[in-house]
């Protein structure tokens, strides 16, 4: 089995002029935008730098102490940049107009960069969710907002840099970046939209029903390539009436969301099949999103991130310090105002019940047990988790 790094070893010496752009190249570009390139790629469109030069600038300015604190995912993205810079296929690709915006007040996070290939085709890559609370909350906001700040900025990026240009382009991203790519293409000015050849959503979440019926979305729908791993969770959230292309991963469960785990053979991905759990989660969350009002979903998201804000230093704590983090989250929930706490519990149980509706009678019995236990639990912590 092989991954993106193996692809660079196998095909890195084959220039794009000889063997053109493919789906694996798309994922590589989508992963490279996770690197913090502020000091390596200027925001001004006119000042493009080669990928090799961008990698050298990044390495020269790297803060080793800060780099050591990066998430594993960001460390992989940095390694990918440095490895790609050594290949004939990628080293001379121009990088233009890197931007990174995080707005706490608007609850939006967006980063993007444009790759210009030798044939003058451009690929605009939008970053997925970063380590920030703002970035993660925007993921959840997709379930009830007609437009998030990151989506709006993504469409503005396309219009700003490609209105009036004759160049053909592709857009894409991983995770939420895939959602941004589809949204930006659908909402771009008609002249820009017409020049988009393909839109890649690499395990990106979908949209609310109202969006997929809009004229802009319908105009680009047939150009969307939606890649998901076998056990996809993120990429099957909400509506998206385009077919999935399922790829193999060497990871398990939700960790398959990590594009570095996707398996490559030659210049394509190894095809896979959906797991039963992925199909179950897709059905469960779809039912829940359709069944709750916008107000209830908003309250749930605000409450959830209020709990996270009190309990976690960063989102990675949920994985790296899960027992302590869980204890702190439960304590924060207990300290919420009574009305807010009861509303949060209600919506959470609604979500669990949707899972029960799919799973059958055994789940109903299990859920009834949880509801019966809530009053006596009073959300108290087990002694071994108390501090």
Image: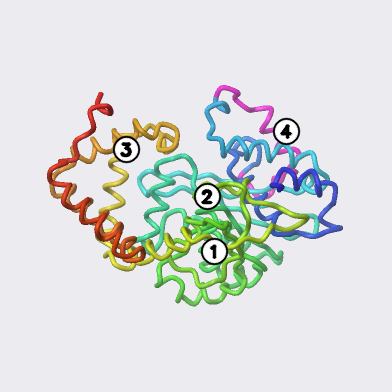
Magenta includes 111?
Answer: no
Q: Which residue is mark 2?
A: 128
Badge 2 element: loop
Secondary structure beneath disc 4? helix
User: Taking 387 as reference, is 12 left or right?
Assistant: right
Query: Can residue 156 be seen?
Result: no
Residue range (magenta): 43-65
Disc 2 to disc 4: CB gap under 8 Å: no
Q: Is residue 5 left or right of residue 309?
A: right
Q: Looking at the image, tell me whether mark 3 or mark 2 is earlier in sequence order.
A: 2
Q: Which residue is mark 1?
A: 182
Could you tell me which residue is drawn at 75 percent across and 59 percent down?
21
Residues marked 2 and 1 touching at CB (< 8 Å): no
- Spatial CA distance of label 1 from label 3 is 30 Å
Q: Earlier in the sequence, mark 4 or mark 1?
A: 4
Q: For residue 192, what is the image quadrant? A: bottom right
The answer to whether 199 appears left or right of 10 in the picture is left
Residue annotated with mark 4: 56
Residue nearest the viewer, comparing 212 with 350: 350
Taking depth in this image into account, of 190 and 136 the one nearest to the observer is: 136
């Amino acid at each position: 089995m092989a991954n993106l790094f193996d692809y660079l070893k196998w095909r890195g010496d084959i220039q794009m002029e000889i063997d053109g752009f493919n789906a694996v190249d798309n994922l590589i570009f989508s992963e490279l935008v996770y690197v913090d390139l502020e000091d390596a790629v200027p925001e001004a469109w006119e000042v493009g730098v080669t990928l090799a030069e961008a990698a050298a600038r990044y390495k020269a300015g790297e803060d080793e102490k800060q780099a050591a604190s990066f998430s594993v995912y960001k460390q992989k993205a940095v390694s990918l940049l440095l490895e790609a810079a050594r290949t004939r296929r990628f080293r001379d690709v121009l990088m233009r107009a890197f931007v990174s915006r995080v707005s706490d007040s608007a609850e939006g996070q967006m980063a993007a960069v444009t790759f210009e290939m030798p044939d003058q085709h451009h690929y605009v890559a939008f970053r997925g969710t970063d380590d920030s609370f703002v970035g993660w909350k925007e993921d959840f906001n997709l379930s009830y907002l007609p437009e998030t700040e990151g989506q709006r900025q993504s469409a503005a990026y396309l219009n700003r840099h490609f209105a009036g240009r004759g160049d053909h382009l592709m857009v894409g991203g991983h995770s939420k970046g895939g959602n941004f790519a589809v949204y930006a293409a659908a909402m771009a000015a008609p002249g820009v939209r017409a020049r988009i050849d393909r839109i890649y959503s690499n395990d990106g979440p979908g949209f609310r029903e109202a969006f997929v019926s809009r004229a802009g979305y319908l105009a680009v729908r047939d150009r969307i390539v939606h890649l998901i791993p076998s056990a996809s969770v993120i990429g099957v959230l909400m509506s998206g009436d385009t077919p999935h292309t399922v790829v193999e991963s060497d990871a398990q469960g939700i960790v398959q969301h990590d594009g570095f785990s996707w398996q490559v053979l030659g210049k394509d991905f190894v095809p896979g099949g959906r797991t039963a759990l992925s199909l179950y989660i897709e059905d469960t969350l779809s039912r829940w999103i359709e069944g709750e009002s916008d107000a209830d979903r908003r309250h749930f998201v605000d409450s959830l991130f209020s709990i996270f804000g009190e309990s976690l230093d960063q989102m990675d704590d949920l994985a790296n310090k899960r027992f302590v983090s869980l204890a702190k989250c439960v304590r924060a929930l207990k300290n919420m105002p009574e009305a807010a706490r009861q509303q949060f519990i209600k919506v959470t149980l609604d979500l669990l019940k949707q899972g029960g509706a799919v799973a059958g009678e055994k789940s109903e019995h299990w859920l009834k047990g949880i509801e019966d236990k809530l009053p006596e639990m009073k959300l108290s912590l087990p002694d071994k988790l108390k501090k």
